[in-house]
Structures are given as structure tokens and as C-alpha cells.
Image: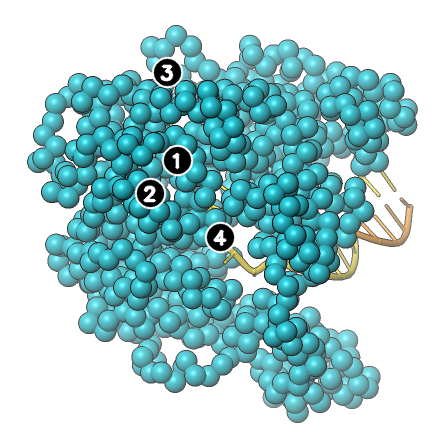
Chain colours: A cyan, B yellow, C orange
Amino acid sequence: MKKFDFKSELNEEQYEAVTWEYSPSVVIAGAGSGKTRVITYRIAYLLNNGVNAINILGLTFTNKAANEMKERIAALIDNERVTRYLMLGTFHSVFNKILRREAGVLGYNSDYTIYSPEDAYILIREIVSSMGLDNKKYDYRAVYKRISYLKNYMYTPERYLANDDLIRNDKINKIGNFVDVYEQYEKKKKANNAMDFDDLLLNTYFLLKKHEDIREKYKNLYGHILVDEFQDTNIVQYEITKLLAGKDDDIMVVGDDAQSIYSFRGANLQNVYSFIREYKAKKFLLKRNYRSTQHIVQASNSLINKNKEQIKKEVYSLKGYGNKILIKETEFDSEEAEFVAKDIKSRLYLERKEYKDFAVLYRTNSQSRKIEEALRRENIPYRVYGGTSFYNRKEIKDVLAYLTFLINPDDTVSFKRIVNFPKRGIGDSSVAKIFDYMTQTGKSLSEALNELDRIPLPARSKKQLNDFLSGLNKFFADLDSVSVATLTKELTQRFGIQEYLKSQNEEEKAANVDELINSMADFEAAAAEMEEGQETVDVTVKAYLESVSLITDLDSDDEEDNKVRIMTVHTAKGLEFPTVYIVGAEENYFPISQSKDSQDRINEERRLFYVAMTRAMENLIITYSKVRYQYNNIDYRNPSRFLKDLPTGHIIFEGTGNLFDNNYRQERTTAETYFSNKRSETKSKVSQKPAVAPSKENLKKINSRITTEIDQYGNIKPGTRAKHEKFGIGTVEKLLGNPPDTRAIINFETQGQKTLLLKYARLIVLG
DNA sequence: ATCGACCGCCTTTTT
DNA sequence: GGCGGTCGAT
């Protein structure tokens, strides 16, 4: 193993942390302060000291982070083989490995399927409809969100049922059957031999909690634990680390409380403080930022210092001051996008940059479209991260469902996807008959399919089903002996998938399926390369599915790919770029409207803005638009309150008037009224957070939405003359109810008086 | 069982 | 302004 001088390659704080004794420690690492460096050197340090690689457990949040660490460690110790024995990966993937091994104990088969949210949606819809519930109230996305939220807080259906308040509130909110849906979901999922993302965490917790022998096994195995981004761990993750690491064990958690941005999925900033307290952890502060210039570091410090409950640390940079932060105001959203595109072009030449040196960050995925359009117009190559990834496309999910079903023939979700794809005349009613049979007999899907004769199906469906199943037989037999690319190619040919898609004029989808098969071939090539010199190379369907079920868009990033990156701020965490644009720096976008009523959430928005700013190495450009077109409406926007927290000395403002003119904050725009009322809109539906009884104030708010007379909606006021495509020209009499549910009473010249819901009526204002 | 037309909701962030 | 879901017609 390569010997190297830790002292000369690390600064003093980093060195102290890396060489700390084998006892609990926490590294609070400011943005750009070499957090990854500390973790990788710490692991190298352990290996150098004779620690066996198999005894090291490293947990991250993204595969990208894990892979980067592996690469860096391999380079450090100059021994790639050793890194293969490290258990270093995301929480989800590491726990998945453990669960596969121990599945039997939990009543699972080790070939269980991992459900993406989209898979879970299918199951939830099925449950809601089979229980005869209203699918508007029990919206599948909302139900899934809430179940996920509950699981992050370790609220199982049993625990939920035991909580009278929750049950009572559900009844009040007319979603009294929520807990039944939750229960059924868990039950069916298990019968399908499937786990969702949250189960990977929660089941690991129960596995270790309830089975002392297994807990001891892993506790002894992983004598050295490192956890990355600890500020974003949720309760379950924290409890699991507690089960794996005793108070005297070697556990190092690394993170930055100033960058905690995942509370919506249960991340608990308090975990950092609890860890320090409970483990009496040695605390290290990394304050020197190696990434950004002074203007950027100092301005972002000013912003984050507005959050009071932080571990105090002033991050500093020894780089030059560099360019000031540019705050650019535009009149319209289209102009904002155009500015970004043109600015990238000019910097490309003036600063001799490459496309990949630029990133455009926004708060919500839906903002990407306008940016994309502008970049395309300027012929700028770009790549969007997040949103709908390749593996989320329907045709891809359908083909993968064939493979999933081959591995796990008890999975009703995959079965449903493929049984009538391509169309072969097996409709919902036939599928329902099979499911009914399963419910009545308590048999699993694979058992039911083996006794089709006992299920009362129309002769035609039965024949088609039998053909379908016998077509699959060959592939069951091939699973272990044929590689995934070959098998999938044959399978798609056998079932005529591309042909079918082409016949539907879905050329692009057919091409995507071909592309999927190509990527499988890439997977095989990569596996062969990685395992070079190893005895076996695993390129089976099972190995492939394992590798794709937990990957995301970002993981397939090729850093050399010379394109502009565009993504949400959440996705950008942990990344850095020479030039960064933060677009849509407006009230209601950033901070987002839904967070305005709670100080905690505003604080989280501020941390998010801090994360966005600190991605930039040299240039930071923040843009906002005064007017934005949304859902056929004009929104008048105010600059983000966070811009006010950036000291004038670090910024250049380009826009009309004065950014720090307080006037803009006093006027309450239609947009603000719209958004601030939005919260009460979803009342009757399942919402993510278990509801408390509506307060009197809320009721008042809801009522006022319907009856209050208001004097303006966008550019429409009483007296406004407007044209409607059906009713013709009319004059607005009255506006009733707060946006977005404002109704207008309009006297039409030819059709008389009508009441129209303005968000849907496409009125053209005249004069 | 399938297709086409319309309707409604969307827009917070993710492993 | 887009997508997915639902419903009615064949």
C-alpha cells in the first residue's frame, strides 16, 4: 500500500479530523471545505493503519458521491482492488444489500422487487378502487406521499391506528379510510414480494432492532462507520446508525447544518446536535472554503447568518475577490431565459469557457422548460437532470417490467404493466378476475397463474393468457444462463414490442427500447471491465435490475460531457461549477410560496439558497423576472427576500429602479394572494402531513374564499370590458372570492349575465 | 376491449 | 399549456 504524508496534503483542521482516534466524531464541513476529502482520506488512513476494508461502512445520499469517493480512495491508496471490499454506497443501496441477504427473516424472498413511486402508484390506485373509495379524495400521489412521510417517522399502520388523534382527524377530514389504505398497501406489497424506497430503510431498522443476532453480526462487521451529509438523515437513518454503532465505536459523521434541505422527506437537522450530545462526539469545524472566490463566500455567509440556530462558523476563502455577484432583473420570464442563454454565449468567448463550466439552477423542475427553449434557440448544448429520467419513461418501465416479472412472478404491478402490452386483448376485467381469485383463495400471483383453469375467464382471454405465459417460459429458463442484453433483445422480438410501438406511430418510443438494450450492452461491457481478472462476471438480468433500480439521472453523469447543466438546487447539492445562474429568485418561487407561513420552512429555503450560491466557483449570476406567465395568467413578481441579505459591496445590480427600494415589499400582488390562499385548497384531500383539526381561522379563510368581494384579479377589475370565446363581449360587474378561485359576474352584450371561474375562462381584456 | 375526446389538475424539493 | 385519467361510443 502506498505510503503518503497526510500532514502535507491536508490543512490542519482536516488533518486533525482524518487522524482522530477510533471514537465518535462529527465533522461540520462548510461549503467547499473539503468534506469529501476528509472522508476519503479518513478511509485511506484506516486502511493504512491496517484496518480491513470489509470492516468499513460508508453511507452517502447519492450514488455519485459514493462512486466519486471510491475512485478517489482507489487513487489515494493506489489499489483499486481494495476499494471493492469497502461497503460504500447510498443508504438505500447498502441497506438493500443487507436486506437481500436477510430477507427470509422478514418474511420476504431475496428476489424481492424494489418499487419506484410510479410502481407504488399503481398498487395504491388498485387498492383505493377495490375499496370503493373516492379517488379524488384518496389521490394516489397524495396517499403515497403521506405514507412515505409517515414511514420516515417510523409510523407503521399499527402505530397509526393506535393514535386516536390521527384517526379522529382523518374522520373530520373525511379521509377516515386512509389508514385502511395504508394497511392494505403494506399487505399487498408484501404479498407481491416488493419493497418501496422507504421500506429499504424501515425494514432494515426492524431487522436490526428485532433480531439481536443479526444486529450483533453487522455491528461487529462494521467496526468503522462514516456517514456523509448527516444533516439530511431522517429519524430512521439515525436510529439505524445508533443500532450499528455503540457510544465508544469508531463512527464519524460529516455534514453541514447550514445545508440541511430535505426536511420534507423527514430529514432532521436536530440529528446533528443529538449526535454530538448522545455520542459525546469530538467536534471538528472545517471553515476554509477552497471552492469559491471571496465575494461569493462572504455574500453567502451574510445570507446564512440570518439563520439563528446554526453551529456558528464563519467560512472564509483565501482566493481573490473575483467578480461581484450579478443580480439581473428582467421584465418578463422569456427575457430572463434569453438573458441566461446569451450571457452563457458571451462568457464562452470572453472568458474562454466551455459549456460544461455552466450550470443553471432553479427551485422547481417546471422552471426548466423556458430555460431549455432559450438554450435551444441559441444552439447551446445542455443536459437536464432530474425531472423525468430515461428509466421513468413508460415504454422503458414496461420493458423492464417484463424482466422484473421474470425475477419475481408474484409481482402484480409488473404483471399488470405487461399482461396487455403490447395489446393482446386481456383487459382490466380479466386481470380483476385473477386478482379476485387471489383474494378469495389467498394464493399468490404465480400460484394463480398456474391454475388458470380454475378462474372463470372468457375463453378468448384464457387463450391469450396462456399464449402469453408460455411465451415467457423460455425466458424463465434463460434467466441464469443468458446475459441481460441478449435476453431482452430476444424477448422484445418475441413479443414484438418495437414493432408494436412503431405500428402505433411511436417511433421514438421504439428507439428508446433499442437504446435500453444498448445500455444493457454497456452495462455488460462495464461489468466485464470492472471484474477483469475475477472469476465470474455477473451480467444476468438480476444483476442488471439490481443496478438500475436505485440509480438516478445524476449517477450517469459524464463529467467530460461538454454541455451546460440545468437542474434543481436540490439536485445540485454537492456539485460545483465555475459559473452558476440561479434563476427565478422571486418571492413565491424562492422562497417557495408554500413555505412562507412558517419560520422553520423559510429557514430551510434560506439554507437552500445558500446551497445554490455556494455551488459557484467564480461567477454567480442571480436573476429574477418582474412578470411571469403561468397557467394563462399574468403574475407580478417581487424579488426574493434573500437578495436583501446580500451586502451591497458584493453585488452588482442590473435592473430598473433600486433593488433595495422597500416599496416593492409593501404591495401585495395578485400572485401573492393566489399563493397564500393555495394552502387551504387541498383540505378535503389526503395531504402529506397528517392533519390536525382545522382551526376556526382556517375555516374563516376557506369561507372567505367563496364570498369575499375583491377588487382586482390580474388585470381584471369591475368595469373591465373583456371578450369570451363563447359568450362574446361583456363588462365585469363583480369579482367574488380570492384567487385562484375568483369568480366574475359578467354582463355579456348578447348572452346576458354569467358567472365565470376566472382561472378557466379565457378572457381577453379589451382596451 | 379499445379508441378517441374531453376534462381536470397541475407545480416543491428526492433516494 | 401539457399530461394523465375518465368516460362514452363502437
Quick one: label 1 or label 4, which is nearer the N terminus?
A: 1
Amino acid type at mark 2: Glu
Circle 2 residue? A278
Does dot 1 land on a helix, a strand or a loop? helix
Q: Are marks 2 and 3 in contact (CB under 8 Å)?
A: no
Q: Nearer the viewer, mark 2 or mark 1?
A: 2
Q: CA distance from mark 2 to mark 3?
A: 42 Å
Label 1 marks a residue whose chain is A
Q: Position of residue A3 (x, y in %)?
A: 12, 23
Asked if A339 appears above or below A131 in the picture, the reply is below
Does dot 2 land on a helix, a strand or a loop? helix
Crowding near the residue tagged with mark 2, few <14, some 14–19, many ≥20 C-alpha atoms within 10 Å: few
Label 4 marks a residue whose chain is A
Quick one: label 4 or label 2, which is nearer the N terminus?
A: 4
Q: Are marks 1 and 3 in contact (CB under 8 Å)?
A: no
Residue at 72% across / 53% down in the picture? A176
Circle 3 residue? A531
Amino acid type at mark 1: Lys
User: Residue A264 bears which disc, if any?
Assistant: 4
Label 3 marks a residue whose chain is A
Q: Is residue A660 left or right of residue A514?
A: left
Q: Is residue A59 left or right of residue A5?
A: right
Amino acid type at mark 4: Phe
Residue at 61% across / 58% down in the picture? A691
